[in-house]
Amino acid sequence: MGKRTLVRRRGRGGKQFRAIIVGKIAPTKYPNFKINELHSGVVMDIIHERGRDAPVAKIKFDDGLYSYVPAPEGTVVGNKIEVGNSAKPSSKNILDLESIPDGTIICNIEKNIGDGGKLIKAAGSSAIVFSHSTDTVKIKFPSGTILNMNSKCRAMIGVIAGGGKKEKPFLKAGNKAKYMQSRGRLYPIVRGIAQAAVYHPHGGGRHQHIGHPSSVARNTPPGAKVGIIAPRKTGRARLKKRQ
C-alpha cells in the first residue's frame, strides 16, 4: 500500500500541520480595568513565548494583578506603564482611542471593547491614529487600510519590539520550515502534478499534466478532494454566435 496523500495527512490534523500551542505562558491581553480609572504597573520581566516572534512584557499593577502584553520598542525591566484614559499619551502607556492624539503610532489595538487587544501584535508592526469623529476613530493599518474603530477601544502607544526578526536570514530550509510550522502554515507546498502518483491524485505522468478534468464534487472523499472543488465556472467563457 502506498503512502497516504498529502491532503489526507493534512486532514488528520497531526501536530506537524498545526500551530504550536504547547509551552504557552499566558494570554497577552490588557487587564480588565475600568477606563475611567488610572492604574500604573511596573515591567517585572521581558520573556520569550514559544511560537511568538515579539517579546512579552510581564507587568505587575498597583493592585497586585499581573498581566502579559506584547512589549513595545524600548521596554526594559523597571519601566512604568499607565492604563486609563487620563494617562499621558506617551510611549508604552495604554489609553482608549479617543484619548490618543491624531498621528500617534499605536499597537495592540482592541477589536472590540474589553477584548484585551487583538490587532497589531506581530513583531515590528504598528498603526497610526488617522482622525477622530464623534464615536469612532480612524486607524491606518500597515496594509494601508483605514478602518473606523470604536473610540472606547484601547491601544498601546508605540511599535511592537522585535522588528529585526524579519531581516534575519533563514540560511537553511529547515529553519524556514519550523518558522512556517509555528504559524500553522505548510511549507513547502509542492504542486500535485509534480508528485508521484502514490502521493497525489494529480501525480504521475511524464509531462506533468493532470490528464483529466481537475473539477471535483463537494462531497468527494478525502484523498481525492483536490483541484477545483464544485466550481461554478472554469476556463474561458464561450460567446454564443448570433443566429
Image: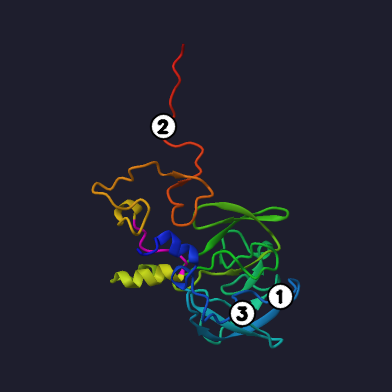
Specify start and end residues of the magenta stretch as a single range. Answer: 183-190
Dot 1: what SS? loop
Cα separation, mark 3 vs mark 1, equals 15 Å
Q: Which residue is mark 2?
A: 236
In which image quadrant can residue 105 be found? bottom right
- At label 2, counting other C-alpha atoms closer than 10 Å, the crowd grade (few under 14, some 14-19, many 20 or more) is few
Marks 1 and 2 sit apart, C-alpha to C-alpha, by: 55 Å
> Which residue is denoted by mark 1 in the rendering?
32
In this image, 99 relative to 194: left or right? right
Across and down, in percent, residue 66 comes to: 64, 84
Cα separation between marks 3 and 2: 59 Å
Against 192, residue 23 (above or below) is: below
The three-letter amino acid code for the residue at tag 3 is: Ile
**Does label 1 or label 2 sit earlier along the sequence?**
1
The residue drawn where x is 49% and y is 78% is: 55
Rendered image coloring scheme: rainbow
